Image: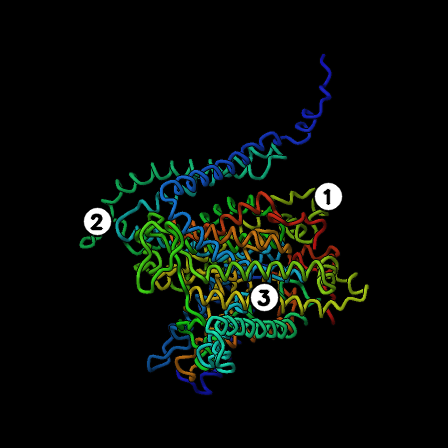
Amino acid sequence: MEMNPFSLVISIVKIVAVLAWLYGLLRVMGHASKWVKIAGIIAAFGIIQLAISLPLGGGFTILNDFDTGLLFQACTMAMVALGLNLIYGFNGQFSLGQWGFYGLGAYAAADITFRWTRGDASGLLVAGLGVILVGLVILGLNRYLQRYRSLPVLSAFTLFLIGTVIAATVALVIGAPLGRMLSPLFGTSNSPGLLSSDLVLQVVFVLAVLIAGVFAAEVSFLFGLPVLSLGSDYFGIATLGFTIVVNTLMVNTDTILPFPEMKGGRGMVGIPQLTTWFWAFVFLILVLVVMRNLIHSSTGRAIMAVREDETAAKAMGIDVASHKLLSFVIGSLFAGIGGGVYAHYIGFLSPGTFDFITGFNPLIIIVFGGLGSMTGTLVATFGWIFFLEGLLRVVLGYLGPEAPTWRFVLYPITLLLVMLLRPQGLLGKVEWGFLHPPAAKQRKPEPPAIQPGPVEATPVAR
Amino acid sequence: MQQANPSQPTRVIARHPGAHLAWIGKGFLLLLAVLAIIVLVRSFFDNPQLFIQIVISGLQLGFVYALIALGYTMVYGIVRLINFAHGDVFMVGAFVSYFAVSYFNLHLWPTVVFPGIPVGVAVVIGSITVILLSMIVCAMMAAVIERVAYRPLRTAPRITALITAIGVSFFLEYFGALNFVFTARFIPYQRPFSVVTWYIKDGIHLVVAGQAAPIGSITFSNIAIIIMVASILMQVALQFLVRRTKTGKAMRATAFDKQTAQLMGINADQVISITFAIGAALAGMGGVLYAIAYPSINTLMGILPGLKAFVAAVLGGIGSIPGAFVGALIMGQAESLTAGYISTPMRDAIAFSILIIVLLVRPTGIFGEPEGEKA
């Protein structure tokens, strides 16, 4: 991208416009009428879609492919960051494992659709069946183990692990032959079969994304169950370890794990490109709605109470351990969904995308936006992506081949400045439109503003 | 009608249903431990030479990690900050020595100044000068980083300091990767002294340059010995500093309770600066020795050793100096045994799995004291 003052102004305008669009979207989603909400979401989608596809002559559009890519990236990243905000911002569990779950989701979803487009339904069947069976086993065991309140965490973990392994084996034994039986339905590459039309592919894509999300959630359950009992910093380190373990496994998918199609460290190629930014937008809205409703429910208040003071929460009758686990699992679910969508955009996954260094990005985003503020997370994600990928790229465009390095020199400086000048995050506790607590709840006297995390309360100068 | 049995175990079980199932978890861990021991013992008896060779290379790695881990554990003990930039200080140490040796020939200064000096003495003095220079530069850099980036955030939420540490780490890595600084390429490192290798087979023999050691022998090099000796020396010196000197007393007091320490007239800011500087000096030394042992340097080289060292510090119980040492040795062994017997890329995964398992059994690490109250 060549450097001129015009393109600089354009990218600043784009950042402002995207944030304004986000504000409008959240405002219209906060409208009381259901139909206005739906119409608003569709209109918000339509505006962007128009900007992407409306020709201005000469092959130009308002948002070019690059900007669309940024939008897509921002939407998937927002899901991951929202999940992390649920874990860290709202529940106070300092996690660095979000990126690992993102990667798990991406690889799981990619594998399912990759196999499907090559006439192999076993990926979908085994993964789907496995996810369902493991989910049932976990839920069932969880209910059964409720009666043993003092069951040591490690014993519970062992039982869950055994159950999961059994369920996964059953899924593998049933699913793989079933997949082989179904493969005649696909036809060959010459004569497309019944099940390889575009519509079916889209359905498979959505299923794959959901399966990937649930898969990530189940892994997070198994991992979080023992590890969440550690103290805050130790939990952070253990989750960092999780990200690194997942990344190492990604590098070894073809040698240690039995997935030759993932091609290990060379990166997985040939993933069908089944999504435009449409699905990222749809899933983001879904995640947003689920998250907002969760946060403003009694469960959400319990989750926040755990963040404020575990002892006090316990005294109020809140099951601290299970609420920590719940927020961790749901946060990972969001990350897995984000990953599943991400995998199908450029059709290429590389383990380098999921290393732990990049894994700090969601954390940086939520701290930027303000811990415990969903709006802050959204704004920070969109602003961050458009700033780092858009603006900085343009500004540094004329530095030549060293531009990418300069980008990562200026980025930490910005980071340091923001941290030094505004340690509570850009937006603090502000919520826009839809993300406000519902009106009915606001009539009661609200407790004073809640401070984030395991972090000491700091007096905010006004 | 029978009266309820008042004996202790029944009551405990009644009040804590499920407590009697603790054996499941313990059995699981025991199974893992037994499996690991079986694998190790079997590989030892399969090929003892190879096993010992792997252990030696693990020791070499472990002692380097120990040097870095000491800085992590001291800083965390005092300010409760995971100093992600510490690994990059290690990198800077390696680069300082690279420039000192390759551009300024600093390791040759004794022969220039005192032309008649014996070669051995000159090499020793020159190498020590290079290492000292790296240590001083790193210490000064860490003190500056602490002053600029961390001190203004002393009262802010802890997470902001952590993010700042990540930012500093990025800055050092990518600023160093710029062409006018260090460049992003891997640079072959010129050693201040040459590496000599010996092999043990019916006595200790020198490996002649250009020839391989005979099959079935155990080799070790002078750099391995230097790393071990230097690391142990630093460990002892640090223990002396922390346990026997006034500065060490001030450090321990600040780590224990900063506010009270300040009330007792301790300049906490100064103590924290000194802690950062000492930790960075050790990391700088580690960087030089690491670069001599594995002579290819890059601005991103500090990330993984730094992280491993941090894991080692956590493993041993963060805040405890002997803990960091023991943890680093365990990490070195785990890494080199995994690389030797399972697969090289899996070594990071195994290292972290060990960390997670150890934390589950002893949540504050091997040497860590149980946390009384929330920090």
Residue at 43% from the left image edge and 80% from the top image edge: B179
Question: Which amino acid lies under the numbered mark 3 shown in the image of this protein?
Answer: Ile
User: Where in the figure is residue A194, as x and y percent of width and height?
Assistant: 25, 49
B267 vs B355, nearest the viewer? B267
Kind of residue at disc 2: Gly
Between marks 2 and 1, how big is the CA–CA gap? 62 Å
Tell me the element at label 1: helix
Q: Is residue A127 left or right of residue B13?
A: left
**Do discs 2 and 1 share a chain?**
yes
**Disc on res. A315:** 1
Q: Is residue B308 above or below residue A183?
A: below
Q: In the rendered image, which residue does mark 3 sit on?
A: B163
A104 left or right, relative to B263: left
Residue denoted by label 2: A187
* Rendered-image quadrant of the N terminus of chain B: top right
A6 lies above or below A459? below
Please state the horizontal and vertical placement of residue A243, each as a whole percent of the image: 48, 55
**Where does residue B183 sit, x and y in percent of width and height?**
43, 77
Neighbour tally class for label 1: few under 14, some 14-19, many 20 plus, Cα within 10 Å: few
**Disc 3: host chain:** B
Q: Where is residue B140 in the image (x, y as percent from the top left)?
A: 61, 74
Structural crowding at the residue carrying mark 2, measured as other residues with C-alpha within 10 Å and reported as few (<14), some (14–19) or many (≥20) = some
For residue A272, which quarter of the picture? bottom left
Judging from the image, mark 1 belongs to the subunit labelled A
Q: Can residue B33 be seen in this view?
A: yes
